Image (cartoon, rainbow, N blue to C red):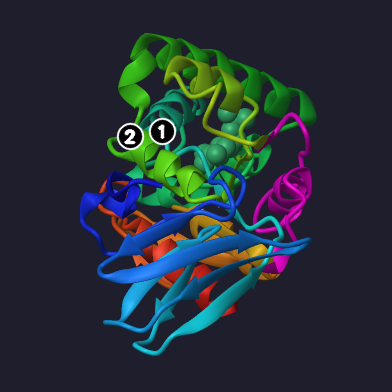
Amino acid sequence: MSKEEALSGDERALLFNPDRDSAGNEITYKGRQCTFRIEDSSASVEVVAGEPIEIVMGGVLFSIPAEAGTHRIELRPRACIFDLDGVVADSAPCHYRAWKAIADKLGIEFDEEKNHLLRGVSRRRSLEIMADGQVELSEEDIEKCMTEKNEIYKGMIATAGMSLLLPGAREFLKKLRRAGLKIALASASRNAKTILRNIGMIDGYFDAIADGTDTSIAKPDPAVFLMAAKRVNAAPSDCLVFEDAPAGVDAAIAGKMGSVGVGPAGVDHADIREDSLEKADVYDVFEFFGRKG
Ligand code: BG6
Ligand code: MG
């Protein structure tokens, strides 16, 4: 393991990924000799005495005190689960504009403020919220509106293409994966894979994908998160969910997972708050898993 592989090059922590880095590795980091070992179901680092340092093993942060000692983690999958719309891709404005076209056709009021209520919720539920108290829709009308909205939306995301990729998203996911965390996508959208393809993230970024084609049970029910967790063999308590929607954070809490509220509003009840993945710090994630052990 070279010094260059230390986290972000800023030497805040030394990274060891038990899935990738070879055991028996020895490195002198900030003057302290560190020896990494992998046993049956655990990874450990033996450190000689010296100045306090920080080590990230399998995505778990260890604050190593000055004394010599051995620090160990149980090897089990720990996962970061990402919502798509509003976290990795800037597709929420397309959803809004497509719904607005339907609202105008129906002659009902719909504005950006009301649109906040639609973040993270299913296609059908979005229409119900929009129409609520303004217009009665038959099952046939509902199907027609949903199909029409989706056609408009698909046109928009095709035109937008790569520009939907939110800044910093790819880099952030790569750093977490490099550290040994599993990365999953969990979205209510049936268009999730199309968007991932458009933004160049369908391959190489996610260990598992669960989306609206797998389940129609909408957030705040945790179904889609639990499905994503299962696909990477992680226990819910070993998962951290990144969400921009209040319903998404509620779903993470209901699923007994940690949560990161991403974006401007409505997600202050999450365990961690970040403005965007561009501004987010992988270190906060390592600390989260460090607290859980
Ligand atoms: C969520 C969006 O990710 O997916 C919601 O935040 C959307 O706005 C939902 O309604 C379903 O998406 P789609 O693409 O299947 O209509
Ligand atoms: Mg979202």
At horizontal 77% and vertical 50% (from top left) the residue drawn is 233
Q: Nearer the viewer, residue 92 or 208?
A: 208
Ligand 1, by image quadrant, is top right
Could you give the CA–CA distance between mark 1 and mark 2, rounded to whole angstroms?
5 Å
Residue 166 is marked as 2
**Mark 1 sits on what residue?**
89
The kind of residue on which mark 1 rests is Ala
Vertical placement of residue 9 versus 188, above or below: below
Where is residue 6 drawn, in percent x and y?
32, 53
Please give left or right for residue 232 compared with residue 253 in the image.
right
The kind of residue on which mark 2 rests is Leu
Vertical placement of residue 138 versus 131, above or below: above
At horizontal 41% and vertical 15% (from top left) the residue drawn is 156
Where is residue 269 drawn, in percent x and y?
46, 73
Please give left or right for residue 216 compared with residue 195 in the image.
right
Instruction: Give the residues in magenta.
Output: 209-237
Residue 112 is marked as none
Q: Residues within 10 Å of mark 2 (few under 14, many from 20)?
A: some
- Which quadrant would residue 67 be assigned to in this image? bottom left
Residue 267 visible within the image: no
Is the C terminus in the top left, top right, bottom left or bottom right quadrant? bottom right
Where is residue 25 drawn, in percent x and y?
50, 54
Residue 78 visible within the image: yes
Q: Is mark 2 within 8 Å of ligand 2?
A: no
